[in-house]
Image (tube, grey):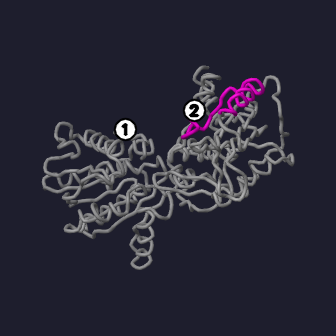
Amino acid sequence: MSSETSPSRSESASGQPSTGEPHHPLGLRRLRPYQREIATAVLNSVFGKRGLTFTVEIARQGGKNELSAQLELLLLTLFMTEPMNLVKCSPTFKPQTVISMMRLKDRLNDAGFTGIWTTEMGYIIRLLNARAVFLSAEESANVVGNTAHLLLEIDEAQDVSKEKFTRDFKPMGATTNVTTVLYGTTWDESTLLEEVKQTNLELEKKDGNRRHFRYDWQEVAKYNPDYLAYVEVERQRLGEDHPLFLTQYCLQPVRGGGGFLSNQQRAQLQGKHPRRHSPESGKVYVAGIDLAGEAADGELLINTGPSHQDATVVTIAELDFTGTNALQKQPVIRVVEHCWWTGVRHPDLYPRLVDILKNVWGCKRIVVDATGMGQPVASFLRQALGSRVIPFTFTAPSKSKLGFDLLAAINSGRLKTHAADGSAEYTEFWSEVEKAKSVYRPNLTMNFYVDPARGHDDFLMSLALVVEAANRYEVREAKGS
């Protein structure tokens, strides 16, 4: 979902005074050149009753929602005396569909229709006889029976189910030969947007009619200096190879099933500072703890992979604020120690963990795996060490964010591991890093893991949790300053 700010009535979408170009009807003259290029193609198809299907990829915050609202405004205005519908769907009703409705209402007011347009049933905006129908594309949404006469729009099409589109939305324009527009940003090669995009590119080769429009962040930045500054910060924060930067701003699809970290990223992760077994005076330390599972009888679960049992791993990192990037305002994270145990029951770990975290390292933030059998350990540590302990429950969304944050820390140069020391911990850590895989899923989520048949990911998860601890410490301190 895009949340770009709409221009005022006296300004264009680029923030400059409107030129008042007469050949662009109504508010279309307020759009940027690349937006007008799309609008012209769509309107030609609508007015010529050509029934073309367009795919539109615009970098995040690049103005696709404003383009959509202006098209809706124009069509409602031109056909206000006729009982015709345009239909727009979004992956969710709240907030995405609601935001689209609010934007159209604002544009209708800007155009002088205040008091003339009305709403019906909470999801229809009506201008005299013409209606804009806003629907949810969630799997459970009952949308069958609507007809699209003027335009069918699919917002954030990369997050809409291909089956839902084909079964429920595409037939809405069957009897009217409706023009269809799918908006969105790139994700992976399996999405609805990518599938229709590839079809459009093949059709373009055959008949020369442009059906796919793509404008990455660099194109958007030509018309908006503030946007350029914003994306430059994001590029530095995430790194150019981060999946979110590649897909949302560069509009390059990710390809899952490969290695989680590239050779370059592993080289960036490798630091030169020595490993330490005790803290330095005046330094700030944080910890990430990945806990081994336990069976019902209290025995530790044994992984079926070729190496050791599941391990409990504590990763200790020093936060270096002298190396803080001025734009990111985040410290450098230097991993200085790994502690690990296999075959040790959780109750026997309690005193060791408390001693290491409190008496040895004096950790300021501790993020601990509180999933399943880890919950009692997390509760015990929080009782013993107070609010510095932050329980972390692994779910598909929370692990996805953890993985993206880990990649951002590596790509930006914020995260460094200690130099090689020949230890078993060092060897196991890098073995897991090299074996780690990534899988990208719908709705901008991902998973990272080591195939159980090849080994374990205890050190890798502990590393991700220590990054979370560093991020929590920086955020907490900023709020209190």
Residue 19 is situated, as x and y percent measured from the top left of the image, at: 38, 47
Q: Look at the picture and state if 394 lies above or below 364.
A: below
The kind of residue tagged 2 is Pro
Q: Residue 282 sits in which quadrant? A: top right
**From mark 1 to mark 2, how far is it between C-alphas?**
54 Å
**Which residue does the image show at 25% across and 68% down from the upper left?**
48
**Which residue does the image show at 20% across and 55% down from the upper left?**
85
The kind of residue tagged 1 is Ser
Residue 227 covered by magenta stretch: no
Residue range of the region highlighted in magenta in the rendering: 347-375
Between 248 and 307, which is closer to the camera in this rendering? 307
Between 376 and 16, which is closer to the camera in this rendering? 376
Assign a secondary structure to mark 2.
helix
Query: Counting residues from the N terminus, which is met first, the one under dot 1 or under dot 2?
Result: 1
**Which residue does the image show at 68% across and 41% down from the upper left?**
312
Q: Which residue is mark 2?
A: 376
Between 102 and 463, which is closer to the camera in this rendering? 463
Q: Which residue is mark 1?
A: 8
Mark 1 nearby-residue class (10 Å; few <14, some 14–19, many ≥20): few
Q: Is residue 332 left or right of residue 238?
A: right
Q: Is residue 364 left or right of residue 208?
A: right
In the rendered view of the protein, which quadrant contains the C terminus? top right
Note whether residue 284 is visible. yes
> Residue furthest toward the top?
481
Q: Is residue 332 left or right of residue 129?
A: right
Residue 337: give its label. Answer: none
